[in-house]
Amino acid sequence: MLVVMRTDATTAQVDAVCDAIRALGFTPVPMPGEQRTAVGLIGNDGQVDGAHIGGMGGVAQVINVTKPFKQVSREWKPENTIVTIAPGVAFGGNDIVVMAGPCSVENEQQILTAARAVRAAGATALRGGAYKPRSSPYSFQGLGSKGLELLALARRETGLPIVTEAMDEAGAHEVAEIADMIQIGARNMQNYSLLRTVGKIGKPVLLKRGMSATITDLLLSAEYILAEGNPHVVLCERGLRGFDSSTRNVFDVTAIPVVQRASHLPMVADPSHGTGVRALVTPMARAAVAAGADGILVEVHPTPERALSDGAQSLYPDQFTKLMLELRTIAEAIGRHVAPSPGTASVSVG
Amino acid sequence: MLVVMRTDATTAQVDAVCDAIRALGFTPVPMPGEQRTAVGLIGNDGQVDGAHIGGMGGVAQVINVTKPFKQVSREWKPENTIVTIAPGVAFGGNDIVVMAGPCSVENEQQILTAARAVRAAGATALRGGAYKPRSSPYSFQGLGSKGLELLALARRETGLPIVTEAMDEAGAHEVAEIADMIQIGARNMQNYSLLRTVGKIGKPVLLKRGMSATITDLLLSAEYILAEGNPHVVLCERGLRGFDSSTRNVFDVTAIPVVQRASHLPMVADPSHGTGVRALVTPMARAAVAAGADGILVEVHPTPERALSDGAQSLYPDQFTKLMLELRTIAEAIGRHVAPSPGTASVSVG
Amino acid sequence: MLVVMRTDATTAQVDAVCDAIRALGFTPVPMPGEQRTAVGLIGNDGQVDGAHIGGMGGVAQVINVTKPFKQVSREWKPENTIVTIAPGVAFGGNDIVVMAGPCSVENEQQILTAARAVRAAGATALRGGAYKPRSSPYSFQGLGSKGLELLALARRETGLPIVTEAMDEAGAHEVAEIADMIQIGARNMQNYSLLRTVGKIGKPVLLKRGMSATITDLLLSAEYILAEGNPHVVLCERGLRGFDSSTRNVFDVTAIPVVQRASHLPMVADPSHGTGVRALVTPMARAAVAAGADGILVEVHPTPERALSDGAQSLYPDQFTKLMLELRTIAEAIGRHVAPSPGTASVSVG
Amino acid sequence: MLVVMRTDATTAQVDAVCDAIRALGFTPVPMPGEQRTAVGLIGNDGQVDGAHIGGMGGVAQVINVTKPFKQVSREWKPENTIVTIAPGVAFGGNDIVVMAGPCSVENEQQILTAARAVRAAGATALRGGAYKPRSSPYSFQGLGSKGLELLALARRETGLPIVTEAMDEAGAHEVAEIADMIQIGARNMQNYSLLRTVGKIGKPVLLKRGMSATITDLLLSAEYILAEGNPHVVLCERGLRGFDSSTRNVFDVTAIPVVQRASHLPMVADPSHGTGVRALVTPMARAAVAAGADGILVEVHPTPERALSDGAQSLYPDQFTKLMLELRTIAEAIGRHVAPSPGTASVSVG
């Protein structure tokens, strides 16, 4: 923490700030400058809440130097965390994991067709929503428990592990019984009760970044899960709230390397929600992999024009097949590989 | 819904869109223009999800004309909804309700001192957090049940009704037993399970706008509560995520009249979280009332420099007293009144 | 400047940073913490550009402590600057200056009618565009020189001083010959050649905040004008780019007290561009005055439905008359006065 | 244009809107719905300014259907525009043009060293600022005319064409005499006088997107240049204003395919300004190419730690060399090529 005094701060005001720092159990270090004095701290362990000092007389600004998160930090654990969700399906190593499938599970035929199609194109995992958070209470809310059963069926048929969303604590326990990875959606990124619940459950978690969450906010939310003893967390960029209606969101591709530098946790990206427009999904999936993503999440639907949700951003199966080919070459360009589908040998480009 | 075709759209593509609209149960109205054709809909009841049409061949854009919310709309119910949380304490009429108190309940002496101070200055209700959503798992998380008991004690001592936050479904039931109004925080604005729960409980709800929520998003979240049969909802602006670190948030004062035009629900504002800086709370509280807010939420702490949370944005009691005087005159300027404390006669300016 | 080292920074890396600071002519002050070391500076005069240190080995972050602006700062000049644009019309004192008129000067009858109407309602100055920056090259671009002549005519008829925009250097000289105050629009806030030009001209300048400018950016742009020897600068909030299409912009009312705390320059607000919707102009003009604005800029048109630009946000004359009454009472509530029209005695409420 | 009426709009109000549309010279098409009526237009040529209709009685919203730009639109000209700035150096075809060099020209040795280094690594053009727009009037503002001479010298030495910025009309003429492409910076994207000037000059223009410009704003600014008869315009994404200080800007990679779908003009990206952090430039340059950029702009400095501007975001020459190798493979993955340095044969990967 650094306390910057106003240029007209009196000596008494600087002394009062030093006293307040001592009261918090730390040693103040005043640094007089030509224009103003700043007061540093020695011994800050990152848990100091010195916000109230910002309101003291003569104080211009309080700057937090130490990052507020701990266990998620790369400074805490320098080597990458590997999150394994099924035999041979791991995030955070050299492999890039492709999770594909429809936005929502709609019925048996739809999910089986989708699962087989993405498996045939080389996807590593199956995504699909049974519980759907929708802005409107009148929109389709997902099949619920029935949807989870259909996902389990699709896994038996294709061997693909399952990633699906939980929206509340009861749902998290139910999802955990079937899914290989529990997704926490962007709207729930700061639903701390839910974060604690999936922390206690201990299954791998895919934590999506909120629409206006800073990287620090995202890492602090992950910290809630790790603080409960669950280190199996994969982070996901899925688009920020933006001012231009030409896309659904601003897909913050740069967040990928930013998170990877700050944290040891794997970082993936969702170009489908990130853009909201089918024609943009392919170029932005390529961009995410080129930026170093540890995986991507892509919506693929056998018949997007009949989808119950997100039809406009779902790829057709043949578009997804072509994308997979491009991704393999881009991965090679940066010395990585697209993870093979479970049960198959690794696919190489050359 | 209006479907705008590309200038190079073929007749077959326009026909396909018309067919897709018929398949949804509506009548298409093609409108040929000099540059392009647009296709309108007759009979749209607001629940159509035509997003998939956006992905059809030759389509440039799909524009939703009908607002996606219903019961919260002023078009659904033209007259203001009055939300009464205690005898004589009502939102949505001519009175402006001032809710004041500390960010968190810290101990008996603190909450009683704060409650008496804001009562003496003329506040209408007491705010104070027992359950606190904090970005970091290592920050003070509130006193929980003990905090609720202390709030009840403060109500017995001062007669002020209580507004306090619930963070999850179990907490909502507990808070509902003591509080006069259940607050849903900005981070939980799209926690739909929680919204449904407070909808079923039926107590008055203070729903805060999320940091990057559009007005439509806010109204749709309120719609979740009304859809469960609970019409006692008050909305609250508390600041948007912004790009300038000189304030904690961008306090969107304009949201007050925008919401009041779109909805019959009362709309209040929280200048404390909206700005995050003590010196800005007073001018922005005045601005909110001048803009037509049906109430304000202000953090007041007996000793802000010792607060366990939000000290830098809490007013000193004497600052709050001065603010109340200014608010009364501003309310008069627009033909309204600051609501009196429960059990007192209305205070008039002249 | 404060250089925060990574927790794994080596002693050699800390030493290298200290050397780099010495190379800039300052004294480094290393502050070892439990987690990491930070290095402060003694003697920073605010012009140090230490950005390159951010790229050195072992550096986590470089934090600028000293504000980059000087002459515009309240720390440089504690008392308010008073900007006088005509006899009796001054910004920055107790008076609140109301500038009103149409978006564009369209013809003689329109501008005279508008000028008389706003004068009758009590406006202090006349606003109106002769040169109009428009997003599209095909939109009406203003009457140019002819518009300036008509503004001069309106001044002769009503006594109201004139505020109008200049878009380039040649235009600035032409506008300066007629106008009492030269407006620099939001799109040109960082057109440094133009800022230098109006700095040299020396006439009062109304500098509008850019749509995504921080307060620091705004003050630095003003610094360009003061650095050329022209201290007669009034700053103006007119709305930020936002994500919600329910208003044209996000009107950042809080910027008013933020600027007034940071700078001695007067700060006004433009609720017409700030909201873009007629029905929102009145409540937000009230909010701006309640927040402490030193003036407001309001679009008023005799027949908004026939305006060549900005018709949807222009007040009808009778709406403006009613607004003036409300503003007078709100000004009283905070111990200020709405400035009288030139040539009239001050209007008091009571 | 589509005019959406309120649900409580009267027949007289609908009629008034129809009359207003006829007064603009178009045919109104009322579409009654279950909830409300909407009124469409037949014959809209894109230049209608119907904003004032938004303020009429009973109107809920006015939606613009036709895009406000013309000549820049892909609907106006379906095939890609090829912008050639020197023999063999062309944007908009299959080649990806890499423009590299220091932020500012600092002295003869620096610019020659930089030019030779980027040439050796395979860059196609040299970037470097002679006139620098800086937020602070006290920062280094560039060498001006002397800088232009040094750029010309570097071109003679290396054969690389030159891209450099002009900040005002006088400067544009001076820059045009030396540069192969005139850059208009983000801060001047809506400096319409400058846009018209470079439109008249007729040289190739690199137009950077403003920090809060929508894609429509960017295309309308380009339209100003084309409207003056200059079709040689290349657009550039360089980062949006964002809320997270972990990067300098939000680099909107998605803008690349969005612009390419909407316009026939080439679209490039600047990952150096887009991120502001050296370690992020390489992954984001790769992402831009993977997303389909027609070129990139990269800051490379022989000794970034001694740069007079933007040192923290400049690559070291060896980092740039490695980046070029990766870019070539990524280009292959999508069927494109990195353009060779002028005077060399094309470099192929395999």
Image (cartoon, coloured by chain):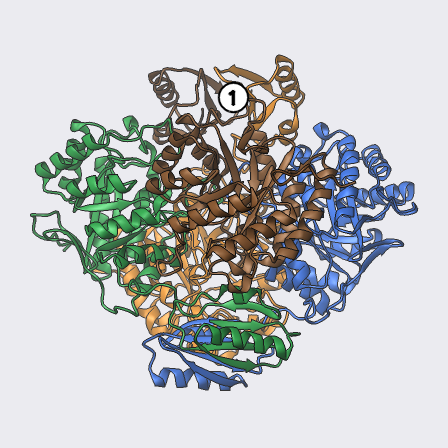
Chain colours: A orange, B blue, C brown, D green
Direction front: furthest residue: C157
As displayed, is residue C28 above or below residue A257?
A: above
Which residue is more in the foreground, D121 or D47? D47
Q: Say whether residue C37 is visible.
A: yes
Q: Is residue A265 above or below residue A303?
A: above
Pointer 1 chain: C
For the C terminus of chain C, the quadrant is: top right
Q: Position of residue B31 (x, y in %)?
A: 44, 81
B149 sits left or right of A38 in the view: right
- Which of the 4 image quadrants contains residue B138? top right
The spot of residue D249 in percent (x, y) is 41, 44
Crowding near the residue tagged with mark 1, few <14, some 14–19, many ≥20 C-alpha atoms within 10 Å: some
The quarter of the image holding the N terminus of chain C is top left
Tag 1 secondary structure: loop
- Residue B155 lies, in percent from the top left, at 87, 44
Q: Residue B86, image x and y in percent?
A: 87, 54
Between A41 and A73, the one lying in front of the other is A41
**In this orientation, which residue lies closer to the viewer: A139 or C168?**
C168
Q: Is residue A184 in sight in this rendering? A: no
The residue shown at (72%, 64%) is: B264
Query: Three-letter amino acid code at disc 1?
Result: Trp
Above or below — where is C348 with respect to D293? above
Residue drawn at x 64%, y 17% is A13
**Number of numbered callouts drawn:** 1
Q: Is residue D209 left or right of residue C109?
A: left
**Pointer 1 residue:** C76
